[in-house]
Image: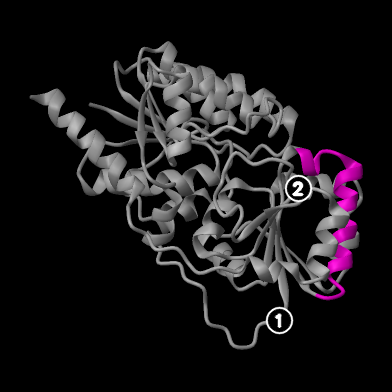
Amino acid sequence: MSNIFIVGTRAQLIKVAPVIYFFEKEQLPVTFILTGQHRDTMQDLIDEFQIQTHPIHLIPNNKEHSNILALLSWLPKIFKLLINFLGKYKNANVFVHGDTLTTLASAVSAKLTNNKVIHLESGLTSKQLLSPFPEEMIRRIVFRTTNIACCPTRKDFDHIQKHYPKTTALNTFGNTIVDSINLLNINKSNTSESQESIVVSIHRFQNIYNKERLSEISKMLNTLSEKYILNFVLHPATEKKLKKFKLFNDLDHNKRINLLPRMTYQNFLTLALDSDVVITDGGSNQEELAFFGHPTIILRDHTERQDGIGSNAILINEIPNLTNYIINHKFIELKHSRSILHNSPSQLITNYFKTANTYDKS
């Protein structure tokens, strides 16, 4: 039985890597494809997780796509390449993850070529069709193509069983990102003399593609820098929009704001855990920081994830409210203890397919 893992973005690779790791450990066959949706630091992540399977780059030397037009021109090209590649297989397990354009193209391609769609991190829904956009729409399409849904929570499991009864639902009792943290042995460092600091990571459509919204966020960061050192980790798309809207130089000239490139997973998490609080709009950040109980402010109206909500994480979408929340040190109430890893979602997924593979051979 062929097991084909298709990955496009950094966030996907961080969550898929531990599954590949356990597949390799159990000597299950692995084919590993990179679509090129993200390019920057992907090899660094592969090295960090010690993945042995050499990745197949469907578009060699492809540049990363940091705007909508580039992604729209890339999508039909990658879709055609996936159809051609997967057309060589029959009834293979095609593992797709999450809710990106790579997820959409991979799931549809697998379905059209009569292969099985295995959806990792399945069942999540905001119940708001256009929020987050386009992730919620992609998820709903992918759910309809999925043969086996690997669901991180009981709520996600129940959602698949109720609305997609023909799909086999597997409760993994957690997100594979906890395995990523465990495999890399990431811990909060015990620095005795750390400055008051905030880590910022934003990249979602709703926050960076609207000039007025991004300008408001930039003003907030300048205000917060009067009290805190800010480490702003820039996604390529975020940097591009800051420059387009002529907001970059103002932030760059502020000596209390460090504009940082994307970094390795270990380095980013270490930086985040050494801060007082993290401002993010990313679902992966929400999940990993929930594991550590680290104060997290999610710059969104809605989230399809429940990780940390009501304990270490809070949703605040209005910029003045967020600014006041931090200035008044309310985020201190969000600090909680680190979670204990009781189960390995990646090992559970691996065991399921190892058993299925053994059954198919008998």
Expressed as whole percent of the image width and height from the top left, the position of residue 65 reads 66, 37
Residue 238's disc is 2
Expressed as whole percent of the image width and height from the top left, the position of residue 4 reads 35, 31
In which quarter of the view is residue 115 placed?
top left
Position above or below: 349 against 58 = below
The amino acid beneath tag 2 is: Thr
Q: What's the magenta region?
A: 206-227
Q: Is residue 47 visible?
A: no
In which quarter of the view is residue 342 placed?
bottom left
Position above or below: 30 against 112 = below
Expressed as whole percent of the image width and height from the top left, the position of residue 157 reads 42, 33
CA neighbours of label 2 inside 10 A, class few (<14), some (14 to 19), many (20+):
many
Expressed as whole percent of the image width and height from the top left, the position of residue 1 reads 22, 26
Please tell me which residue lies in front, 234 or 357: 357
The amino acid beneath tag 1 is: Gln
- The residue tagged 1 is 195
Which secondary structure lies at badge 1?
loop
Q: Is residue 67 visible?
A: yes
CA neighbours of label 1 inside 10 A, class few (<14), some (14 to 19), many (20+):
few
Query: Which comes before the other along the chain, label 1 or label 2?
Result: 1
Left or right of 70? Residue 181 is left
Which residue of the protein is positioned furthest toward the left in this rendering? 362
Which secondary structure lies at badge 2?
helix
Q: Is residue 208 magenta?
A: yes
